[in-house]
Amino acid sequence: MKSSLWLFVLIAVMLSGCGDGDTETGTENTELSGEIKIAGSSTVYPIAQAMAEEFSKLHPEVNIVVSSTGTGGGFSNFFIPDNSDINNASRLIKDNELEQLRANGIEPIQLKVGIDALSMVVNKNADWLDHLTFGQLKQIWGPDTPPKKWNEISPDWPDEKFELYGPAATSGTFDYFTLKVIGQEDQHRSDYHKTEHDNVIVQGIAGNIYALGYFGYAYYAQNTDRLKALAIDRGDGPVLPSLENARSDEYPLSRPLFIYVKKKSLGKKHIKEFVDFFVRQSATSLISDVGYAPITEAMLQENLAKLNIN
């Protein structure tokens, strides 16, 4: 009897041990799966793409689709009609966009994921120019009788026509630039090469010594052998775009970058885990590797509070 009892106890202990092991590792061994759809800003696109690649290494069964549509295009064509979970944005959401979302029963959560130094760039060989003032930027890009040649801005500059490149009106960068520099949103000269693809701007400026354009700092950082970034003077002297100057807000065209996440999408475990990963990595060197400044610790804690994550 005693031997039978001890055998029973031994078997019970072994089974108990196996059960504990499954309990302890169950969460870790539960593989996430599902789809995440991201659209929006071409400026934030490299960040979202990098986050998707890193997250997929940990969770290969999660399919993350990232599209570059422009901030406004992402909101109007994907996020508001409920065709995406996350919208990348290089500006704050507009009141009318928020109203349309809420009319569709969608509540967005705004999260900061990087800091950009919006860069005004010229051809690497444009040796007559190293900085522009806010007044000169407004003169070049404003809608009121815009100049056609460089020497119309300064007599010391070439008697040559501009070739201008910039984002389309659906871009958050366009919205930010027109409001910040020209002083009124959507007020911008129309005779320039408009595109939602920043690499098109890179190619255009690299191919013409008299070209000028603007986009997010990451695209300049990837092409310093072909492009030159101009210092910007808002009245306190010229300041070059850099990650350090963006994070300190010393650079006049520094701006936060965002993602907007649908509150209801966070009810899906794979999306909540991805967003948690995204915001935590936004405070690390991964953002610097992409070409933007990481968010501050205060920004990170603000993000986590919005997500109710400790």
Image (spheres, rainbow, N blue to C red):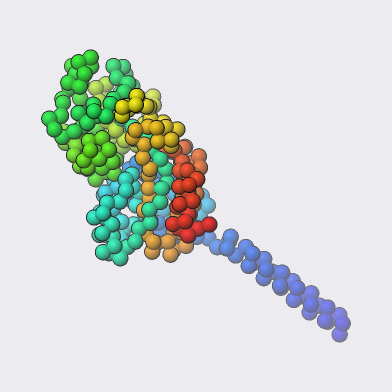
Name the spot of residue 184 as percent of width and height, x first: 21, 40
Residue at 22%, 35% (x, y): give it.
Answer: 182
Q: Is residue 296 above or below residue 87?
A: above
Residue sticking out furthest to the bottom? 1
Residue at 31%, 29% (x, y): give it.
Answer: 234
Name the spot of residue 140 as percent of width and height, x first: 20, 28
Residue sticking out furthest to the front? 236
Name the spot of residue 144 as percent of width and height, x first: 13, 33
Residue sticking out furthest to the right? 2
Q: Quadrant of residue 203?
A: top left
Give the side of residue 262 with respect to residue 139, left or right: right
Residue at 26%, 35% (x, y): give it.
Answer: 181
Quarter placement of the N terminus: bottom right
Residue 222 visible in the shown view? no
What is the tally of numbered marks visible in this picture? 0
Residue sticking out furthest to the left? 145
Q: Quadrant of residue 154?
A: top left
Most foreground residue, 179 or 286: 179
Most foreground residue, 204 or 105: 105
Residue at 15%, 29% (x, y): give it.
Answer: 146
Name the spot of residue 23 as percent of width and height, x first: 63, 67
Give the side of residue 148 with respect to residue 301, left or right: left
